[in-house]
Image (tube, helix red, strand yellow):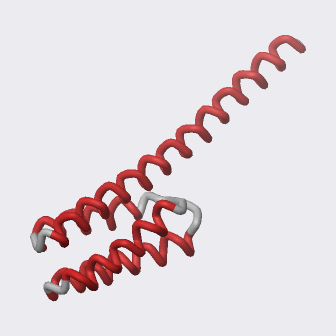
Amino acid sequence: MNIIKKTMLTFLMAISLGAVSTVALAEDASVSETIVHVEKALEEVNKSDFSAARLHLKAARSASEKISGHDDIVKKANASVIQGQIQSNKGDVKKAAEELNKALVLYKSL
């Protein structure tokens, strides 16, 4: 009976550790995906290609919704992305780039 209990306990611990590591990997992937899209949007803004930048900014905002934890940093970074999106819609390269750089710094701090 003790062998069965120990085996079940070991099995349950292995499953729970696997689930935790999967969540951590998913969060890292979301942060990386968000950073990549913000960097690509910044490149497009600097080239004054606002339609391509708009697509990357939408993708960055979508990917950032999957980030869990660090809610205050994610909220500030999302606000900067939104402001960058607004400035790029107005055609202001300098201000859009400033906001996107702020967002990159915040996302990279995660």
Q: Is residue 4 above or below residue 54?
A: above
Residue beneath the point at 35% across and 52% down: 33
Which residue in the rendered view is the most extreme toward the right? 2
- Is residue 93 found left or right of 103 in the rendered image? left
What residue is drawn where x is 59% and y is 38%?
A: 21
In the rendered image, which quarter contains the C terminus? bottom right
Looking at the rendering, which quadrant does residue 65 occupy? bottom left
**Residue 12 against residue 23 in the figure, above or below:** above
For image coordinates 49% across by 51% down, the residue present is 27
Report the label total.
Answer: 0
Left or right position of 90 against 72: left
Which quadrant of the rendered structure holds the N terminus? Answer: top right
Q: Quadrant of residue 80?
A: bottom left
Q: Is 44 placed above or below 12 here?
A: below
Q: Find residue 42 and report its horizontal and vertical position in percent.
A: 25, 67
Percent from the top left, x then y, of residue 95?
28, 85
- Say if 88 sits above or below 38 in the image: below
Whether residue 30 sits left or right of residue 96 in the image: it is right
The picture places residue 60, in percent across and down from the top left corner, at 31, 63
Q: Residue at x 20, y 81 (%)?
A: 93
Q: Is residue 54 in view from this perspective? A: no
User: On the rendered structure, is 46 left or right of 3?
Assistant: left
Asked if residue 87 shows in the view, the reply is yes
Q: Position of residue 10 (x, y in %)?
A: 76, 22
